[in-house]
Structures are given as C-alpha cells and as structure tokens.
Amino acid sequence: MSPPPPPLGRSRRKGGRSDHVFDPALVDRELVDVRVQFAQGRWTRARSLLVATGTDWDRRGHRLLALAAVPSAAGWAADWLLAEPDSADATTLLALAAVARSRRPKAGPAERDRAREACLTAAALDPADPTPWLGLMTLERTHGTHEAAAGHFEEIRARHPEHHHAHHLMTASLAETNPESDPLHPVYDFAAWAAEQAPADSPLAVLPVVAHAERYRVLAAAGSVSADPAASGHWSGRRAGQVMKAAFDWWLEWEREDHPRHHTDLNFLAHAKSCEGRPAEAAALFHRIGPHVTEVPWSYAGRDPYREFITARTLALGAP
C-alpha cells in the first residue's frame, strides 16, 4: 500500500470561505523556482525556462499562464522586451499578463481591448504558437461569447490538436450553452469526440468526466439540480456510471504522469468519484494528488473548494 499523502494545512478562517491559495504551477518545480525570481524582477531565468520548454505547447501554456499570474508580471515582461524587442516569449508573456489584469473585477473595456491587441501581436510574432490564442480564449471565457471562444479554440487546435487547457476551456464554455437539464447535451458529444480523436495515451480521455462536472456546475447554478451532489442524481445515472468507469479504468493504465496539467485531471477524477459515492476509488486518486489541490471542480455548486476537497479527502482516506 502506498504511503498517505502529506497533510494539507487547514484554513485560518473560522467562518466564510477558506483562504487557501491555489497554485497554478502545481508540480512544476522548475516553474516554481523560476517564478520566485521572476517576481523579483530577474526575468533571465524565465527566459531560459521558456527556451528550454520549446514547442511542448501544453507545458509552454502552463508555464506562461503561471508566470503571467505574478502581480508584477506586466512590468517585468516590459523590461524584458526593452532588452529583447523581438522576443516572442516576452511578447507572449506580456500579452498573458494583460489578459490576467483584464480579468480582475475592476478592469474595464479598455484593458480588455489592450489585452486582445497584445495577444494578436504575440500571435503574429510566432504564428505556430497556440499560446496567444489560449490567452484570447481565456479572455473570451470571461468577457466575450461562446462563439468567440470557439473561434479561438479552432485556432489552437490548428496548431496543437490535443491542447489540454483549450479543451477544458471549450468544454466549460459549451456546457453553459443550455442551462436546462438535457441528457443529450452537445457537450457530451464534444468530449467523447475529443477523447476518441486523441492518441491512446492522451489525458483528453478524461474529458467526458470534465464535461459531466461542467454540466453539474451549470445545472446547480441554475437550480435545476441540488447543490448537494448525493441528492442531485447527477452523479448516479447511467451516463455518469459509464463516463466515470471508462475514465477511471483508463487512468489505472496510464503511465504518463509528466503532463504539466496531470493534477488537474486527477482532481476532476477524485471529485467525480467522491460525488459518485465511491470513496475507495477516490482514495487512490487522493494519494496521487497529495497537496496539489485545484480550485475547480471543487468550487462547483457554490462550495468552498478547499473545504470541499478536505471533506472528500478525509472521507476517502479516513484521516484529515
């Protein structure tokens, strides 16, 4: 039996939402180290990291988004551009930092327009890179339309057909197109199609589970199902059983744990197994997750994500 995962810190708040900080870097230790230096203005390490990342598009997007989330990212990326005006890495990082700033609550239309222009500039500088289009898709998910997000998704797929993050964004966007209950909702067809199109070792095999979770988010927000997973019926139907079994069986055989967003999939699977009422299967996933909890999907149905994770983890493993 594998040892239990390391303990997670408890929230300092006694009431309201927990103050746990979710780290988008996840298990990318190189990224974590570089990000500390980047936050202090030492952008040369970020430059070296992105050069080493090359055309691993999933990892490049993962790393650039995490660096762009640093509060001072726009300023340091601008300094980098002063030193290397033609740098596609610096231009893309500046664009994603603009996207991050434009999604803040007090941001206005002018900031969103600047972010769009910055992403288009980065896309023109390196036409093969899907990452600027990922920035545009992220922006449209917050402030635009499903049709606009879908257009950017096609641009990403043209450059990297298996783009993990883009498929998750598209699934979330498509799940919102009809808030009413519909067992034949097109998001299920999309997720099944994407999983079938991908190679056998692709983590997109988990996308049908993501689609089911996204529909739960939409239905619970609309009041169409209970915010209590056990009482909602959403996780106990025939479709849910088929989706969960296929994804879990695939995960048991999967050997590629080097994917930068691997823990995103593990969290979706653990959430699904917990909602399904299968703590023994969830336990195996919690062991793999360790301390690397993600905000989604634990926040769905208006729940506090960290507390929801801790509750499900405790039920599965039998100890906090």
Image: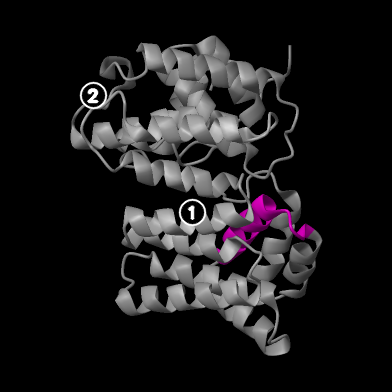
Amino acid type assigned to the residue bearing label 2 in the image: Ser
Magenta region:
53-69
From where the camera sits, is residue 233 visible?
Answer: yes
Left or right: 290 in relation to 146: right
Q: Nearer the viewer, residue 162 or 131?
A: 162
Left or right: 281 in relation to 112: right
Percent coordinates x, y for residue 297 in the rendering: 43, 36
Label 1 and label 2: CA atoms lie apart by 31 Å
Q: How is the image coloured?
A: one colour
Quadrant in the rendering for residue 223:
top left
Q: Label 1 belongs to which residue?
A: 153
Residue in the image at 47% along x and 14% along y:
242
Quadrant in the rendering for residue 159:
bottom right
Mark 1 and mark 2 lie on one chain; the one further toward the N terminus is 1
Percent coordinates x, y for residue 103 in the rendering: 39, 64
From where the camera sits, is residue 317 visible?
Answer: no
Q: Is residue 271 above or below residue 96?
A: above
